[in-house]
Image (spheres, rainbow, N blue to C red):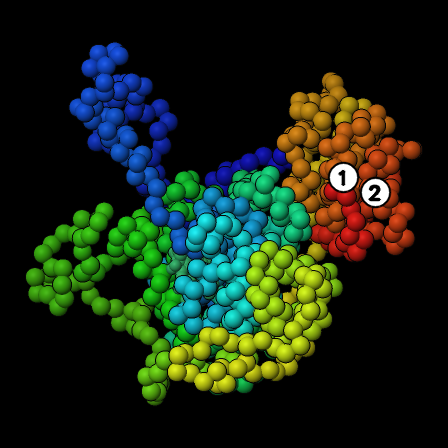
Amino acid sequence: MAKKPLTPEQSGLPANKKVQQLSQHQADATGQPMTTNHGLGINDDQNSLKAGERGATLLEDFILREKITHFDHERIPERIVHARGAGAHGVFKLYKPIPHLSKAHFLNTDTETPVFVRFSTVAGSRGSTDLARDVRGFAVKFYTQQGNFDLVGNNMPVFFIQDAMKFPDLIHAVKPEPDNEMPQAASAHDTFWDFISMMPESAHMVMWAMSDRAIPRSYRMMEGFGVHTFRLINDKGESHFVKFHWKPLLGVHAVAWDEAQNISGKDPDFHRRDLWEAIQMGSFPEWELGIQVVAEADEHKFDFDLLDPTKLIPEELVPVQRIGKLTLNRNPDNFFAETEQVAFHVGHVVPGIDFTNDPLLQGRLFSYTDTQLIRLGGPNFHEIPINRPIVPVHNNQRDGYMRQTINVGKASYGPNSTGNNDPQQVKARDGGFTSHTERIDAKKIRARSRSFFDHFSQAKLFFHSQSKPEQNHIIDALSFELGKVKTVAIRERMLSILQQIEATLAEQVAANLGLKVPTKPQQLNFSVPADGNPKDFEPVHKEPSVKKSPALSMANTIKDNISTRKIAFLLADGVDVSSVTDMKKSLESAGAVIEIIAPKLGHIGTGNKKIQVDESLLTAASVFYDAVFVPAGKSSIEMLAQQPEAIHFLNEAYKHCKAIAIADEHDNALIKNSYIATAQKSDGTKDNALLIGNTKEITKNFITAIAQHRNWDREKARKVPA
Ligand code: HDE
């Protein structure tokens, strides 16, 4: 690794209030004697108490029993969704107070707000791969001066369903099938597509889930979205609708699907490791908090319903205002204590932020506390250090499993005269929470608003806003997923749905499946109540009011830097050391991280020209890197040309459209033996991400190519043998 690991303390960052609070709960065994949980010194931690050296173990052995009992109870239920995740501490700093919109203290202060963030996949178990095609969770806990605010979002701005009633069905459908518990962490199976093909409201989200957004390059390179429309409330009690966004400063980037599948085998912890290493190295991940604000009076001015969580507000209609920055600057000390035990809840709001009647959000308001009761074992999970607010907690709630607080006094009720009527309620002007007063004059009804029935126009908008390679990836993903579906009727129903989005999309997927797009649309909505008239539930077909939204395409993301990008240097004995050091210096000064890969571990060269090898061709794989450089040196190149792993490395990097630089040697054997020679011949067009020549001359263009992330044009050939 190029940069030395450093902790926030070493980097001069002050420990924020939350970190200080957590440190009171830390236990450090360095230099300490070993004890039981009750403080008794342990003399022998190697042998159990027996009746004679070769005799049976005695029940009396309370030390053995304590140790084994604790071990037996080490696991808690994993989250029913978002089970696999990775977390980090950080801070949120506001750019500019927004008192006209919200009275929330943390949106109006100069001081940094401590945060804890947990990223996750949704469908897989705790031990599943990071690189599954899936939505990513992006949950942020702000430890504010007014209590905790949780922004529990995803990396996609919409959701599959419109009503919380359907959530258990959606999750049952996507989870491994119940008879054989297969497949793990994958939506490519019958039950998921069976459900989706009968739920046209999922069309928009399916486009996102089949896009490259579902296979991010890094958690650090994902957007985040609050999804629902929330409210901001100012101190006059005025409400504005708001959508929350997180915009990563490194841009939004994805891996290739074939790459994702490879990484899943070679390093299922890829995203977790990437986050951990970036923070350890001091390359702190950053996002800007964006808000799209809509005045109350404009609630109905859009051609979709703001309460419908399958819709986004195109940025072309309402621009995203960037109001602050989130920086993750500290890894957790203990995965279980912090990342596993952290409990998020959309209902954790502060004065100045409130809910809307989005029926999905309303259901979530129930679910999150309920799920912690089973997951964390009782009603006192708010006392677990990671979940505690940084402000004092006082109320009349008492007792329950694992209660930590020792409440003094007799009064645990209010009103009371035994304790001076404390704790006192808080006036709104002093920060007491009051719900936004919303006028509702309605009949009690189990129904869905007609304004929720346009399921396809934004799916269309999303597809049309993608670049050609992104569209191809969606077609490939759908062909893969539906190809894994065994029931032909399900595939056909899905083709009917796709046809409503875009005929050419449906045709290309159908061709890959060896099917024809059904001429007559199949029944499109099966989610009709028993006494409902199916006609009333037919989707409304509309054209999107915005034809294209450039903000939806990753092709338009930030591509001006190579900060934290990982570059593999492929070399062997006889390498030209100056070619290595020159390129290394240039890439590192642009912020990249270099790893030296050689046929075996140890060193290349001797004396002061010795180069330390980071990984061997056995332990490394091209899928772990963003780009490859082969330095000059005839015998190094010739030796690599004889190594199938080195040739595969290069071919695979080429196939995954990565930047490749080769410091040419006359008659370059590696180029000849790899696919690159064929590619050069077969494709007349210039490949800007393939640089061959003198080290110094190719450096600048190599850096530009890495910043571009991938040269997806290479996929056109689709015949790379890696
Ligand atoms: Fe969640 N969701 N969800 N969800 N969700 C959970 O809560 C639920 C939804 C999201 O890192 C659970 O503590 C319902 C949308 C994230 O700990 C559970 C509905 C969005 C996380 C739950 C939704 C999310 C969760 C499981 C539909 C994006 C991980 C464990 C009504 C805006 C948080 C837990 C973490 C976790 C319920 C839909 C995001 C069961 C009922 C939409 C990021 O309570």
Quarter assignment of residue 358:
bottom left
User: Of helix, strand and loop, which one carries label 2?
Assistant: helix
Q: Is residue 170 above or below residue 542?
A: above
**The furthest residue to the right:** 666
| Chain-order first, disc 1 or disc 2 | 1
- 10 Å neighbourhood of mark 1: few (<14), some, or many (≥20)? many
In the rendered image, the quadrant that contains the N terminus is top right
Image spot of residue 593 (x, y percent) = 66, 40
- The residue under the point 43% across, 54% down is 178
Residue identifier under label 1: 650
Amino acid carrying mark 1 in the image: Leu
Horizontal side of residue 663 vs 276, given as left or right: right
Amino acid carrying mark 2 in the image: Ile
Image spot of residue 281 (x, y percent) = 57, 40
- The residue under the point 32% across, 19% down is 46
- The residue under the point 60% across, 39% down is 266
Residue 676 circle label:
2
